[in-house]
Image (cartoon, rainbow, N blue to C red):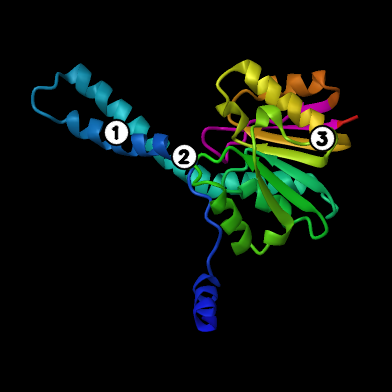
Amino acid sequence: MLDNIRGVERKHANSKPHFGIDAPGLVLGFAAGGPLLLLASLLHGVVPPLAWTMRCTGLVMCGEAILMTLGSLHGKRRVVRDMIDSLQLHGDEQVLDVGCGRGLLLLAAARHLPRGRATGIDLWSTRDQGGNAVAQRNAWLAGVAGRVRTDTGDMRHLPYADASFDVVVSGLAIHNLPTETEREQAVREIARVLKPGGQVALLDVRCTALYAQTLREAGLDVRRSWPEFRMFPWARIVRGRKG
């Protein structure tokens, strides 16, 4: 039995956390649909104007599949690293990652918290993220499992008391809520659980002006970044501090 356990430990000793690709269904659709359109445009009998349109659309879809993949695997990770570094954590904070998914942002924060705790909350879509077991396994592989906690919950109704966290972050999650009202509600919840003097940093590909406005209405000092061209689609970061 002991030999089996050691065998498993050796097997995963050099493993790294795996965070997957954002919107995998969309990327797969572009990756499959683009080449199919290019091939279809070459079929006999396709009139030139239609063939030209099909080729252009196919090339755009192929390009978007490539850019989204590179953005997920490389660009987003650099943006997240820089975003967490900019918070200048002291190491003993309580950090909340809203919509943490596989844990890229969560673990980036946990690495800066030798005396603190990083809590991730999500509804754990098994279709896109694989469930919270993936986030927990990534925390173990990154060597920060003791600093990480994962909860199941809805960002529109966070199950935490007022002023529970020193820092709240979120990455590419809030825009998935179906209505503007629900997105506003989630951002208000983020402001509610943030301690006075605490920081918030929200990375997203759209709706960031709404996030900034909602945080200002909640009394935070807010700024919104220029687009982050290291990702595709381009993203912005909304940063704020609670007075």
Q: Which residue is mark 3?
A: 161
Which of these two is toward me, 35 or 100?
A: 100
Q: Is residue 128 left or right of residue 108?
A: left
The image shows residue 234 at horizontal and vertical percentages of 56, 32
> Which label's residue is closer to the chain start, 1 or 2?
1
The image shows residue 204 at horizontal and vertical percentages of 62, 32
Magenta span contains residue 238: yes
Nearest-to-viewer mark from 1 and 3 = 3
Q: Which residue is mark 1?
A: 33
Q: Which residues are magenta?
A: 221-241
Total number of numbered labels? 3
Which of these two is toward me, 123 or 72?
A: 123
Q: Are marks 1 and 3 in contact (CB under 8 Å)?
A: no
Magenta span contains residue 142: no
Name the outermost residue toward the bottom: 3
> Are there few (<14), some (14-19), or many (20+) residues within 10 Å of tag 2?
many
